[in-house]
Amino acid sequence: MAKDLGTEETPQQAEQQDPEVGPAWLMGDRLKMTKESHSNSWKSSLAGSHAGSRAGSQVESTGTHNTKMTTDAQEAQERWCTKMRMSAEALDSLEQGQQSDDSGTFSSNSTRCGDTVLTFKDVAFQVTLNTGEKKEILAPISGHFESGRLAAIMGPSGCGKTTLLDILAGQKSDTYSGTVHFNGRPRDKLFPRISAYVPQEDEMPKYLTVSEAVEFNGMLKFERPSFVSRKMERQWILRRLEVLGLLEVKDTYIGDASSLRGISGGQKRRLSLAKRLTSGAQVFFCDEPTSGLSATDAETCMRYMKHIAQFYNVIVVVVIHQPRIEVANLFDELLLMTANPGRAVYNGKMEDVVGYLQQVGFDVPMHANPVDFFMDLVTPEVSTAEVKLFVNHYGELIEPKVLAKVDEGLAVDMPSALELLEDIRGQMLKFGRVPALRNSKYGVRFRRQLYYVFLRQLKLRWRDWKSLLADVLGAIIKALVVGIVYMRTGELDVKAQVSFFFMLCMSCAIDGLKNMPTVIGERNIVKNETSEVLYSDWAYIISFTFLNLIQAVLVHCLFVWIIFAMSGLRWTMFRSIYLWTTLLAVTMDAMYLMVAAVAKDSTTAIIMSLPFMMLFLLFNGFTATRSSVVPWMRWAIEISPVAYSIQQITFTAKWAYADNDSLVSSYTYIITTSDYKDQPEVAVVVIASCFAIFKIIQMICFHFLNNIKR
Ligand SMILES: Nc1ncnc2c1ncn2[C@@H]1O[C@H](COP(=O)(O)OP(=O)(O)O)[C@@H](O)[C@H]1O
Ligand SMILES: [Mg+2]
């Protein structure tokens, strides 16, 4: 597929080539045909739109300095878009089956959906300060965005751009006022299925490849038709990657800044977009997708976004900071805000900015970036700012027009989210059976969520072999250290043997501490994904618990086996010792994970786990027995998995050495003085209950605490 489409070059490279000759990958026969058949219509539509905009624009009519720059930028964009468009048109025709290959093609948004609109009215947000005072962050603001157009939200730092974007995307966790309508209806619970929120920092697992990350999102957003094979799925993903110029890094790990070299910052931003593109979203909300990128990367990224808006006919709303002129010119709409509180000072076409500024008495200096110039005028901290003036002008000149448009937008009768999803499902039916549309915020059934989340977890663990190896080596070294101390315990007296059981249970009880940083590290990624309504957090907790359990049981087996072999105790005891120490390790692990779900970071988690650890480790029924502790603390021994494990292992040892009278009598003495009762059923029930309680609390805390606050 990659070869067929031949996208072996970056957009930058594409841009450097002669537009008439075309880049090498376009010269294949099939694509050459596509070029001929589509480029004309694209070029003419582009020319038409620009001609139209120029005719109506006050930018041209004023004949200002930046006409030349704007024209250059438009030409560069046209060249870039023409190439990208042809590539995308090729994809489109492939998707539509006009040039289908042997395997057929499949796509969730193969045909463009109809027009969509997003309208918001009087959206406002205020916070209560520590002093009890209320502070207005966002004064009532209204607006209207349409599909196929790239809209920018700009303004000085702290003016409430992210707040507004979060509210529009339905991601704001605090209460706000105002209404947000999609296609003339209030957003419903299906809105997350047709919208995509791209946060400023998109955290992704470092050991996932680019194509796997995209595939994961795609698989969780749609039920796949029955005839769609793996190969077709893969093609579909490669197509999305091509549209965003990520084909060449499709098999590269995402990586991170410290331990694993992965894709670049710009590619990561584009991957964030590609992931959402597979979800068939009709509205994209992107928070500062270009911050932290080089100017070239930022431009490339925005060009791709423009391309997505036009090609997929979707709404793309972008919060952006100080774009350079080439980037600013890519936007169709601009919502400019001022700070303290956040208010709109401009809301309209980007191309009309220069004209508007002139209308209110400000000429953009020669070679200045009009957007930068405008920003300076509405940034309260800048000495030459005219915030009040612009707020007043907005109220007089722009707001009435915006409100008229908003009222129109609120009154339209366009397809609901459910109808759009039905439409997409209808398109998929040609690829086989598709389960009936579910009226749920999740794209796929819980079973499938669990399946994909589990598979990904398994893959990530396997790839992070260094951590696996560290786990195994750690267990071996620990076993050797404890083993050397208790070497040949089997030949010693009961006191030595019982101390060995005690030490063994203690080491098993603290082993789970090591899992806390891992689960806390993964939590942010999971929280991001669950806030995108990709899957339920239960799917993650069940997968994690299961995999953790398997890993713990296997590594624990190695640990106990080494220690046991070194101790020289009778092998008839091994099964019982392994059983009780495993139950203990797994239950204590559940306790640590419960604490980790509550704690906000690893350090807090360790501090918080100490009291629980002390409770179970000190009330162990061996150093503190049922008869030695104060009566009102006896319950601590009755619920301690450590105490039950030591107790049951002691009984096992007594039977294992039943032929040795002296050992038997010593064991009987210890059992009597420690008040031990041979009650394996009670031990299992208590340990299992502890496990269940810890797990339930962990799940509840994971769901409700440490959520992403926006
Ligand atoms: N949930 C919240 N609680 C308290 N303050 C908030 C909250 N959300 C936003 N703010 C405040 O609102 C202001 C605007 O924030 P933000 O929307 O992130 O600005 P921008 O994205 O324009 O830089 C900031 O001062 C921020 O601290
Ligand atoms: Mg922000």
Image (cartoon, rainbow, N blue to C red):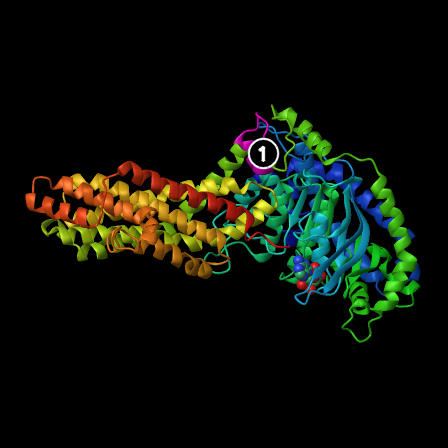
Q: What percent of the width, then of the height, locates residue 661?
A: 6, 43
Residue 360 in the figure: left or right of residue 624: right
Q: Quadrant of residue 107?
A: top right
The response on whether ligand 1 sits within 8 Å of label 1 is: no
For this rendering, which residue is in front, 298 or 550?
550
Residue at screen point 11% across, 44% down: 664
SS of the residue under disc 1: loop
User: Magenta includes 233?
Assistant: yes
The answer to whether 133 is drawn above or below residue 494 in the figure is below
Quadrant where the image shows the N terminus: top right
Q: What percent of the width, then of the height, locates residue 498?
A: 18, 51
Q: Amino acid at mark 1?
A: Val
Quadrant where the image shows the C terminus: bottom right
Of all residues shown, which one is farthest toward the bottom?
A: 383
Q: Which residues are magenta?
A: 219-234
Of all residues shown, which one is farthest toward the front?
A: 631
User: Magenta includes 486?
Assistant: no
Label 1 sits on residue: 444
